[in-house]
Structure formats: structure tokens, C-alpha cells
Amino acid sequence: MADLKTRYLNLELKSPVILGSSPMTGSLDNLKRAEDNGAGAVVLRSLFEELITDEARITVDSASGFMPFSDAANFLEGASRDYFLNQYLKLVQDAKKSLSIPVIPSICCNTHGAWVEYAKRFEACGADAIELNYYILASDSRITGQQVEKMYQNLIKAARKAVSIPLAIKIGRQFSSLSNMIHVFERLGVDGIVLFNRFVRADIDLESLKISPGMVLGSKADYSETLRWIALMAAETKVDFAASTGIHDSDTVIKMLIAGAKCAQLTSAVYNEGFEVIGRYNNAIEQFMDKHHFSSLNDFIGILAQERISQPEEWERAQYMRVQSK
Ligand SMILES: Cc1cc2nc3c(=O)[nH]c(=O)nc-3n(C[C@H](O)[C@H](O)[C@H](O)COP(=O)(O)O)c2cc1C
């Protein structure tokens, strides 16, 4: 009988199929459904520091007519922030009480630093690990690549100092030297790296000639860069990699494991097909393992990682040199 257990962030997961962060993981009901359908862990929707700060400001602004004193405004802003934070903490606590699989809250932090306090409070609530969701859209030409990298480093240093539970960072692909950054993250003490986040996209509506939202859900075609980067980095570092983006069928989960991921996070697939996909993927992984006589995931996690293959350049091929034109 195939054993689907895997270790991710020093946690034992009963399956490598994880429900990734999105509004879907913001309710206890959905978290339970994920567990009932066989998820190995759940990553809660991100707590957005910026959103909490904005909401607190809106509350203060709407009450400003009744509150001429700045002390009162400060108090209200603090209370409003606490209200949002407490709602999230309650979700963490309830999930920990109701689920037996690991619960991983996610913080989307900015530079204000309040998120360090949130991380500490997640830990106090019994969170099994924390996922840092961090992204700088480097559109300000005055900020250099080195400065952007420094921001990531400062964030990880502060988080590592604040909590002792395992830490993962979920990142996008846009670094000049992604492999260098991954080694830096490892040295700074992250236990896991989620490759990759897929961010909100903007589009143009040709009828109204206005900016419109881009595709919200991802597609299967999105998975190949995740696969490549997991294969490139998995055996080169000791951090655990979680695959995210484009995982829309069980074959893709299996490919990510073969490349070296310890687990795969699903989001769009569950939005599209419901929580049942988790169970279906687990069954398909078992069938694959039986067919190839693998008894545990460790028998094949990372077998095609770059360090372990005879033609490592296969994962580095980027140009279409030999493709025939029509
Ligand atoms: C509607 C929606 C909301 C999301 N919200 C978050 C979030 O709060 N935090 C986060 O880290 N990722 C968030 N994501 C990104 C997903 O966790 C995931 O990384 C991304 O969708 C790529 O995986 P997929 O191809 O399985 O959708 C969101 C994605 C979607 C589609």
C-alpha cells in the first residue's frame, strides 16, 4: 500500500496535496472540507497588513466628525486593527481545535512592521508554521534590484527573530538571480519556499477602453516554470519546496514531486472543480506509486532534480535553438 506521507516545514503531512492560500481558506467550513477530502495541510488566506491598516483608517475617517481628539482617533484606529486581527486569530484557533492536519496562517506584509506582531500572535495561537506572502512590484525606477533584495532579507530576518515555528516564504519569479536569492533565504533561516505565487493581473477592456481585471484563476499551462525552478533548486538546498501555480491535475502534482517538491499547493483547481479534486489526486498518486513500485514518496521525490540527473543542462535550456520553423 503506497504511503503518501511527506515532511514539509518539519511537519509530517499525511498527503503532499495542500490547499493553498486564497479567500477559500478563510472559513472553517472550507478548511474542514479540505481535511475531509484528504488535504495534507491548509494554508489560510493571507492576512493583509495593508488591508487592516486601510480599514482602520476608514473607520477613523468615518468617525472623525464625532472625534475631535487625536487620542480618541488613535484609540479607534488601534481597536479597529485589533478587531480584524482577532477575527483572523479566531480562525487560526478554531482551525487548530477542529482539524488534525497542520494549519499554516499566511501574512502578506508590507514595510510597516506590524506583521511581526501578527506572526508572534499566530505562534501563540498554536499555528504549525507561517507562510510569508511577500512581493514587491519593482515599478519604482529609483529602487535598485539590490534594494529590493534587501527588503526581502530584512523581512525574513525580522520574522525569523520573532517566531520559532517553521517559516516559509512564498515568492514570485522576478529576481535577477533567483537561485542566489533562494540560497540567501536559506541562510537567513527559512524552512520552506513556495514557488511561485500568481499575482493579480490587470488587463484592458477594448470596449470601454478602461483597465479591467485580468484572469483571476490560473490554468494548467502555468506550471512549467514552477517545475523547472523546483528541479533546479530542490537538491541544491536543504529548504523544503512547495509547488504552487498551474497544478490542475494529478500528473502535475506527481511531476512536482519528481522534480523535488515536498508538496503541492492547489488553489484554482479547487475553485474550478471543488474539494473532491484533493481526494482524486491522492488516489492518482497512489496508483502511480503502485505502478512504479514506489512504497513511499521519498522513493521518488527529487529523482529528476537537476543535481541528480546525468544531463543537468536539460533543466537550464531556455532558448528554442533547434525547433523547426514551419
Ligand atoms: C482568488 C485568489 C485569491 C488568492 N489569494 C491569495 C492570498 O491571499 N495569499 C496568497 O499567498 N496567495 C493567494 N492566491 C494565490 C494562490 O495561493 C496560488 O499561489 C495561485 O493561485 C497559483 O496557484 P493555482 O494555479 O493553483 O491557482 C490567490 C489566488 C486566487 C486565484
Image (tube, rainbow, N blue to C red):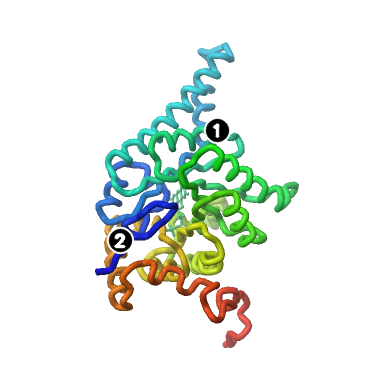
**Which quadrant would the C terminus be assigned to in this image?**
bottom right
* Callout 1: SS: helix
Marks 1 and 2, how far apart at CA? 36 Å
Please tell me the numbered disc located at residue 213.
none
Q: How many marks?
A: 2
**Which quadrant would the N terminus be assigned to in this image?**
bottom left
- Residue 39 place in picture, x, y as percent: 32, 55
Q: Residues within 10 Å of mark 2 (few under 14, many from 20)?
A: many
Q: Is residue 1 left or right of residue 62?
A: left
- Would residue 326 be visible to someone looking at this image? yes
Residue at the disc numbered 2? 277
Residue type of the residue flagged with mark 1 = Ala
The numbered mark, 1 or 2, whose residue comes first in the sequence reads 1
The correct choice, above or below, for 302 with respect to 112 in the image is below
Residue ID at (58%, 35%): 113
Nearer the viewer's eye, disc 1 or disc 2? Answer: 1
- Residue 112 place in picture, x, y as percent: 60, 34
